[in-house]
Image (cartoon, rainbow, N blue to C red):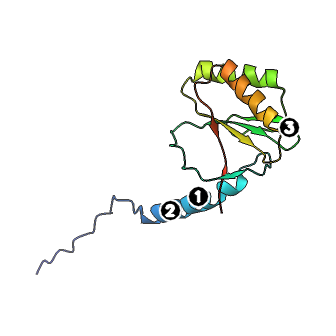
Amino acid sequence: MGHRIKKRKPMAEINVVPYIDVTFVLLIIFMITAPLVQNGVEVDLPQADASPVEQKNELPLIVTIDKEGQYYINIGGQDDDPVSSKVLLLRVAAVLRNKPKTQIYIKGDGAVSYGKVVIAMASLKDAGAPSVGLMTSPAD
């Protein structure tokens, strides 16, 4: 009786389920922590009834005006140092030369003088901005 015992061949497949689980957990962690690590200049936006603007895939350029009337430019998440209206014009013009479809918004503090917002809008227009959006916080 010559029964032969068959040897089992090694499995050549990789079980990817644990890797998918780890990736999913990391994705959730990054989705929760990403909004918390965004930094910027603290402003109290005026409230208004307005509908949200359609977002494009590119990051917008945000000009922030704090309550002291200082200008900050947020290009790719960096808006640490205040700039003058001339520097604002030069930097925005440079961005628009490279990416002419960039959306531009002004985020002005509710206590800032209206003249500072107008100066910022004029500088943006001189830099070649086709349109400028004003950011507000939702009305209660």
- Determine whether the residue tagged by mark 2 lies in a helix, strand or loop: helix
The percent coordinates of residue 52 (x first, y second) are 55, 48
Choose mark 2 or mark 3, whichever is in front. Answer: 3
x then y, percent, for residue 45: 73, 50
Q: Are marks 3 and 1 in contact (CB under 8 Å)?
A: no
Q: Residue furthest left?
A: 1
The spot of residue 126 in percent (x, y) is 69, 18
- Work out whether residue 66 or residue 58 is closer to the camera in this orientation and state it: 66
Q: Earlier in the sequence, mark 3 or mark 1?
A: 1
Res 32 → quadrant? bottom right
Where does residue 105 sit, x and y in percent of width and height?
65, 37
- Which mark, by number, is residue 31? 1
What residue is drawn where x is 58% and y is 30%?
102
Give the answer, above or below, for where 33 lies relative to 109: below
Amino acid type of the residue that numbered disc 1 sits on in the rendered structure: Met
- Crowding around mark 1 (Cα neighbors within 10 Å: few <14, some 14 to 19, many 20+) is few
Amino acid at the residue labelled 2:
Phe
Q: Is residue 13 left or right of residue 29?
A: left
- SS at mark 3? loop
Q: Quadrant of the N terminus?
A: bottom left
Neighbour tally class for label 3: few under 14, some 14-19, many 20 plus, Cα within 10 Å: some
Quarter of the C terminus within the rendering? bottom right
In the rendering, which numbered label is found on residue 24?
Answer: 2
> Mark 2 or mark 3: which comes first in sequence?
2
Find the distance from the CA under tag 2 to the CA under tag 3.
44 Å
Tell us which disc is closer to us: 1 or 2. 1
Would you say the residues marked 1 and 2 are in contact, meaning their CB atoms lie under 8 Å apart?
Answer: no
